[in-house]
Each structure stands twice: as C-alpha cells, then as structure tokens.
Image (cartoon, rainbow, N blue to C red):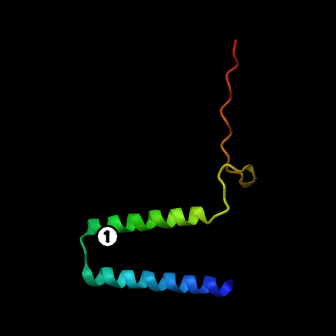
Amino acid sequence: MISRLIVRVALGVAAGVAVVITLITIQPPAWIVLLVGSMVLAGLYIHVRKNSRFDPLDPRFGSCIPPPPRQRDQ
C-alpha cells in the first residue's frame, strides 16, 4: 500500500517536471498556459474531491450551513 503511494507520488512529480520543462522549451502563448493550467487544476480538484471522505454537509466537520428558518403558516 505504501509502495503504491510512493510510486504514484514519484510519477506525479516526474510528470510535473516534464510538463514544466516542455512548457519552458516550447514557450506557448500565455493564454494557452492559462487554459491548460485551469483545466489541470479543475481535474485535480475533481480527482481529490472524488477520493476524499470529506462531506461538506456532514455536521461532524463543523462546516454546515444551518437551514433557513421556515415561515409559519398563518
């Protein structure tokens, strides 16, 4: 289990270094870097949220927004 995690982290770091070196070498326009960077961050966010046990609606985490008060019928 730990060895798989170490391999994943090492591959992720290697991929990140390869992407940075490629971007420095190619020197694409800034809008392409922003577009690709935004997509990568969105993908990373989705991946982390899918693999997380955190539930923002679970009161044990203390981050719940209380429901709005109901208006009583008269």
Q: Is residue 6 above or below residue 55?
A: below
Foreground pick, 44 / 27: 44
Q: Quadrant of the N terminus?
A: bottom right
Horizontal side of 38 relative to 69 (left or right) equals left
Q: Which residue is rendered at x = 39% and y = 64% of the image? A: 38
Residue at image coords 31%, 79%: 23
User: Which residue does the numbered mark 1 point to in the structure image?
Assistant: 33
Q: Residue 35, relative to residue 55: is it above or below?
A: below
Q: Residue at x 42, y 84 (%)?
A: 17
Question: Callout 1: helix, strand or loop?
Answer: helix
Quadrant in which residue 52 is drawn:
bottom right
Q: Quadrant of residue 61?
A: bottom right
Residue 28: horizontal and vertical position, in percent? Answer: 25, 74
Tell me if 20 is positioned left or right of 55 in this view: left
Mark 1 surroundings within 10 Å by alpha-carbon count, few (fewer than 14), some (14 through 19), many (20 or more): few
Look at the picture and state if 24 lies above or below 74.
Answer: below
* Residue nearest the observer in this picture, 51 or 32: 51
Q: Where is residue 3? Give x, y as percent.
A: 65, 88
Please name the amino acid that badge 1 sits on. Val
In the image, 66: left or right of 11?
right
**65 or 53, nearer to the observer:** 53
Place of residue 4 in the rendered image (x, y in percent of width and height, measured from the top left): 62, 84
Residue 12 position, x and y percent, is: 50, 81
Q: Given the current orientation, which residue lies at the most extreme top position?
A: 74
- Residue 17 shown left or right of residue 35 in the figure: right
